[in-house]
Image (tube, rainbow, N blue to C red):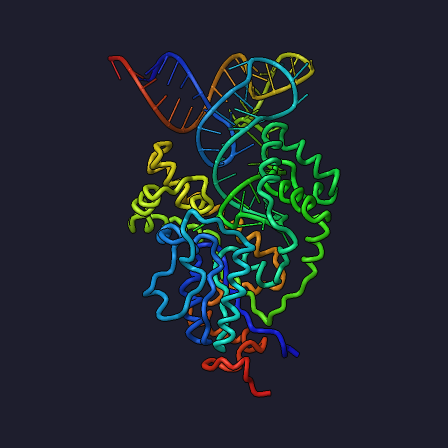
Amino acid sequence: MEENRKPLVVLTGPTAVGKTELSIRLAERIGGEIVSADSMQVYRGMDIGSAKVTASQMRGIPHHLIDILEPDEEFHVVRFQERAKQCMDEIYARGNIPILAGGTGFYIQAVLYDIDFTATRSDPDYREELEKLACERGADYLHEMLREVDPESAEAIHANNVKRVIRALEFYRETGEKISGHNEAERQKKSPYCFAYFVLNDERSRLYENIDRRVDQMMEQGLLQEVARLKEKGCRRDMVSMQGLGYKEILEYLDGEITLDEAVRVLKRDTRHFAKRQLTWFRREKDVIWVEKGRFGYDSERILEYLLSVLREKGILWNDYTVQWGSAPK
RNA sequence: GGCGCCAUAGCCAAGUGGUAAGGCAAAGGUCUGCAACACCUCUAUCACCAGUUCAAAUCUGGUUGGCGCCU
């Protein structure tokens, strides 16, 4: 019954739970290739701050969508989706299983449910115009504009959330349709994949401790130097890449706005906030399989066995060592 | 031992007679082209006891705790 659905494994979770290591071990067991779903690891030169996988960690497992852009390049879901689909096709062609691994929930959603973004192209002029309006006349003015054309969206999006209000207006302007309707339709979509959506998780307090520890490690590894180097190369704070955790805080320090201690403190705090938001996102996603590390005694082998059992159950995997979804015995 | 000051949510902190600002943290949530973004919601009866008063976190007395100074 899953004839035409291609297999897809999603492995995500809040920052610093241990996704990277587990994804590689899983790939080793199922003949998988990793497609990174991480909005920061796509950038070259941003290694320490984005906790990017190192070559030695990879242990020969192919990784995709890492180091594909310069930090001054724009990136967003639509581009991610395009590239992810493209490299997934190649992985299927090789007879392997793609493992979508990373912490950017929105990106995962985009490929897992193959959400349609193509209906609109961006119009920078209109966007700028709206931004100007928001500045001059206030967020409420813009929100009122939205209410006139798409009351449902206006209801759903808080007036202060200027970014989303602008997007909704933009969508209406370009398609003549309400984005609320579009979103509703997309929400009904079923995934075109035969997938397992794993969310690795841990007790909140442990997670937060890990985050604090990892930030300290990043500092020891030379996060400061990494950011300084990027700054020298012309990276500015208004670039999308420089809004990443670790980059924006250290840049503030380098610009003399805060002390280094303060930067580190804020970085830890913001990272904890981020982890919390990620969890909120995953809780809301349907079809999620929660993998609580504590339930497996923090034993990665046991966790792995569990993941494999789910994959077998779902028919994504026939046995541990071969990848034969393309030529599986009936 | 004496004198003085202080005591408001996990932290910082306003409020000096009229029924507890604000910030941070924590927690929960939204998200369909910037998502490690942007945004939203939300937490107290004011150390304790007894008074004064229609009414006290705000005044009085005492208790406890802390801080400072003196002997």
Q: Quadrant of residue A330?
A: bottom right
Using residue A10 as the reference point, say whether residue A155 is left or right of it.
right
The answer to whether residue A299 is seen in the rendering is no
Question: Residue at 63% of width from left, 68% of height from top?
Answer: A192
Residue A177 in picture, x, y percent from top left? 73, 49
* Image height of A278 relative to A96, above or below: above
* Image height of B22 relative to A18, above or below: above
* Image height of B6 relative to A144, above or below: above
Question: Residue at 58% of width from left, 58% of height from top?
Answer: A110
> Which residue is at the front of the view, B37 or A168?
A168
* Image height of A285 relative to A156, above or below: below
Quarter of the figure with the N terminus of chain A: bottom right
The answer to whether residue A95 is seen in the rendering is yes
> Which residue is at the front of the view, A165 or A198?
A165
Q: Number of callouts in the render?
A: 0
Question: Residue at 57% of width from left, 56% of height from top?
Answer: A282
Using residue A209 as the reference point, say whether residue A169 is left or right of it.
right
> Which residue is at the front of the view, A322 or B26?
A322
Residue A245 in picture, x, y percent from top left? 43, 46
Question: Residue at 50% of width from left, 70% of height from top?
Answer: A98
Residue placed furthest toward the bottom? A329
Using residue B56 as the reference point, say whether residue A98 is left or right of it.
left
Residue A125 in picture, x, y percent from top left? 59, 39
Residue A169 in picture, x, y percent from top left? 67, 42
